[in-house]
Image (cartoon, grey):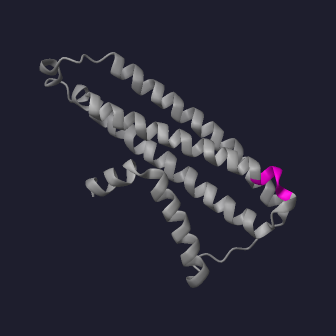
Amino acid sequence: MKKTLDFYINNALFFDSVIIIALWFANSYLTIFDFTIAIKKDNLDIVSDTVSASISLAGFILASLTVIASIRSNITNRPQDAMRNPLEMFFSDANYKRVVQVFKDAIVELVLIFILSYSVWVCQENIDNYTIVKWIISAILLILLSVMRTLIVLFTIIKIDS
């Protein structure tokens, strides 16, 4: 399980995209979700909300990354001292770079969602309602996956510290 989670975290954007594409492909043949499509105005309000949510969550993740960086700056880098504190081992150079990469990938993913959602909202007259609904669901899933990834890493760090 841990190796699978590590593999997913290291290739997050790719696997998030695969999950979304697989979901839509499966739904077109198996009808996993039977959507009742709201009127276009309501869907565009939701797209506007995904714009706000994605940029706000990118800020949250950036703040979390700042906290992690400040924790690391307070930890000694001497290996003999790290043996006494598991948190110091966790923040060794290789582990720290991986943790930072998870947060950076999540920020990039959320900013990408922000840009694409804003583009959908701006180009609303050229996009049909069903495509907007598909984007809403995809954006929400991408937001959920990226936030869950960062929370897993953040809670792992907190768990090590306590």
Q: Is residue 60 above or below residue 135?
A: above
User: Percent position (x, y) of residue 57?
Assistant: 59, 39
Question: Looking at the image, which residue is at 25% across and 16% down?
Answer: 76
Q: Quadrant of residue 24?
A: bottom right
Q: Quadrant of residue 123?
A: bottom right
123 magenta-colored: yes
Q: Magenta stretch: give its range.
A: 120-124
Q: Is residue 29 above or below residue 14?
A: below
User: Percent position (x, y) of residue 154?
Assistant: 40, 37
In the displayed structure, does residue 114 sit left or right of residue 3? right
Q: Quadrant of the N terminus?
A: bottom left
Q: From the image, give the main secondary structure of the stretch colored magenta.
A: helix
User: Percent position (x, y) of residue 52?
Assistant: 70, 42
Question: Looking at the image, which residue is at 74% across and 62% down?
Answer: 132
Asked if one can make out residue 27 in the rendered structure from this viewpoint, the answer is yes
User: Percent position (x, y) of residue 156?
Assistant: 33, 40
In the displayed structure, does residue 18 sit left or right of residue 125? left
Question: Looking at the image, which residue is at 49% across and 64% down?
Answer: 19
Q: Quadrant of residue 34?
A: bottom right
Q: Is residue 118 above or below residue 74?
A: below
Q: Residue furthest bottom?
A: 29
